[in-house]
Amino acid sequence: MFNKRVKIKDALGMPAGKEEITVMGWVRTLRNNQFIALNDGSTNENLQVVLELGLFDEILLKKITTGASVRAVGKLVVSPGKGQQVELKADTVEILGLSDAEKFPLQPKKHSLEFLREIAHLRFRTNTFGSVFRVRHALAFAVHRFFNERGFIYLHTPIITASDAEGAGEMFKVTTLPFDETPRTEEGAVDYKEDFFGRATNLTVSGQLEGELAAMGFSEIYTFGPTFRAENSNTARHLAEFWMIEPEVAFNDLEDNMDLAEAFVRYLIDYVLKNNPADLVFLDQRLAEEERQKPQNERSETGLIEKLEAVASQDFERITYTEAIDILLQSTAYKKKKFKYDIFWGTDLQSEHERWLVEKHFRKPVIVTNYPKEIKAFYMRQNADGKTVAAMDILAPGIGEIVGGSQREERLDVLENRMREMHIPVEQMWWYLDTRRFGTVPHAGFGLGFERMVQFVTGMTNIRDVIPFPRTPNNAEF
Ligand code: 4AD
Ligand code: MG
C-alpha cells in the first residue's frame, strides 16, 4: 500500500488525469474545512487536497489539524485557484497520526531560527530547513560525484584515533576508564594501559594523516566524515562536531592543490545551481528578507543566487600571506583602527581581516598562500625562504576560511626536524614517517569544512542551522 505513494514534488508536475493517485504527508494547514495544504518534504510546495463539502464527516475533519499525518487518495484536477497547476480532488482521506493542535509547537507563522533549534524534531517540517537540508544533501552527493568523476578513491579514516599530532584543536577523549578509582601508574598518572585500547585515544580532528598513507598507494583519495574539536569557541562558524572533506593527492604541488580546491568549490556551487533551483529561490528570498531587517550600511548588496553565480563563474583571487598583510596594513579600515586585532607579519589572520579582504577589497573568494611556518601545522612543506610554508587557505565572502590545506613536507629529515621543534612525538609517528621513508613523493591536500560550504550556499548566518543536530558548547540535546 505504501509503495504506491506519489511524492508531492512529482504529483505537482503531473498533468490532471482520470487515474487515482495516493499521496501522504503532514498537514500544514486546513482552510475552510475544505483545503488541506499537504507537504511531504520532497519540496517546499504544498499539494492542495480538496475535500468536497458534505462528503467527509465532521469527526474526520476535526482530526485534520496542523501537523497531523494523512493519506489521501483522489484524482489530480486542474486547479482553479492561484499558485498551483493541479490539486488533488480527494475521494478518501485517512488519518495516519493525530497532532494535538493545542500542543503542536509550530504555528503557521514565522518562527525564529533559535526557537526551531530547540525543537529539532519539527524543524524538518519548515520551509527554511526543508530547503537547507535538501541543499545539504545535494552538496554531499556532488562531493562524491566530483571525486568519482576524477578517479579518486573514497577512503574511510578512523573516528577513534591515538594520533594527537594534528594540533588542530582540543580533542575529546575516548575512554572506558572509570572516573572514580581511575587506575594510576606508580607515578600517579592515569594508567591508559588499563583502558579499552591499552592507550590514550580521542575522537579524530582530521583524517588527513591517515589519508596521506592511502594517497601513497592510490595516488588520489578523499575522505568525507565527521571530525571533532573541543574548542570552546561559541561562534556562528564553529561546531564541536562537523563534517570535513579531505582530498590528498600524490604528485601534486601547492599550485595543483589550489587548482583542485577551486575547481571543487565551484563545481559544488554549480551543481546546486543546476539541481536545486526552487530551494535556492526560496533561500534567496529568505535572505533578502533578513537583510531588509538590517541597517542600510550592513546590508549585503548582492542576492544569494547572484553571489553563487558569480563565484561559480569567476576565477578566485590568489595572493600570498605577505601580500595580504601589506594590503591590510594599507587599508583605510586599518588606518582608522576599525580592526579589533592588530596586524603584523607573523600574526594569524583573524576572521575580521579575512572578511575584509574578501568582502570589501576583492569582492570574491581569495586563496591566501605561503603563511609563516609558526602559525601552521608541522606537516606543511617548508619554503626556501626558511620562514614560510606551502600552505593555502580559501576565504569566502560571509564565511571567512572555508578551505585549509597545503603541500606536505615530503623530505624525511626536514619533517623530522620540524616535528622535534614543535615537540611532536617522532617515535610514535613512525607509521606516518614511513611514507617518507619508502618511496616518498611530493603531495598535497586540503580540508573543506562541509557545514561552512552549506552555509555559503544557503546563505544561513549561523552554522548551527545547516547541520541537523548541532553539537556546540553546552549543547548536545537530541
Ligand atoms: O584548517 P583545518 O583545521 O585543516 C585541517 O584539519 C587539515 N587537516 C586539512 C587538510 O589539509 N587535509 O580545517 C579545515 C576546514 C577549515 O577550513 C574549516 O572550513 C573547517 O575545516 N573547520 C570547521 N568547521 C566547523 N567547525 C569547526 N570547529 C571547524 N574547524 C575547522
Ligand atoms: Mg585552518
Image (tube, rainbow, N blue to C red):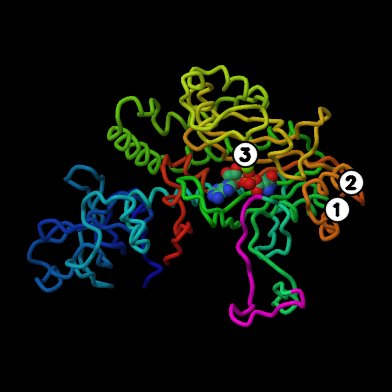
> Is residue 61 in the magenta section?
no
Numbered marks: total: 3
Mark 1 = which residue?
A: 433
Q: Residue at x 68, y 33 (%)?
A: 258
Classify 146 as above or below 344: below
For disc 3, does the CB lie below 8 Å from ligand 1? no
Question: Which residues are the magenta region?
Answer: 168-187
The residue at the far front in this view is 187
Mark 2 = which residue?
A: 412
Viewer-closest of 372 and 340: 340
User: Callout 1 environment at 10 Å: few (<14), some (14 to 19), or many (20+)?
Assistant: many
Q: Residue at x 52, y 53 (%)?
A: 232
> Disc 3 marks which amino acid?
Phe
Q: Mark 2 or mark 3: name the one nearer the start of the chain.
A: 3
Mark 3 = which residue?
A: 264
Q: Mark 2 or mark 1: name the one nearer the start of the chain.
A: 2
User: Callout 2 environment at 10 Å: few (<14), some (14 to 19), or many (20+)?
Assistant: some
Please indicate, yes or no, whether residue 147 appears anywhere in the rendered image: no
Viewer-closest of 157 and 84: 157
Q: Position of residue 341 (x, y in %)?
A: 53, 32
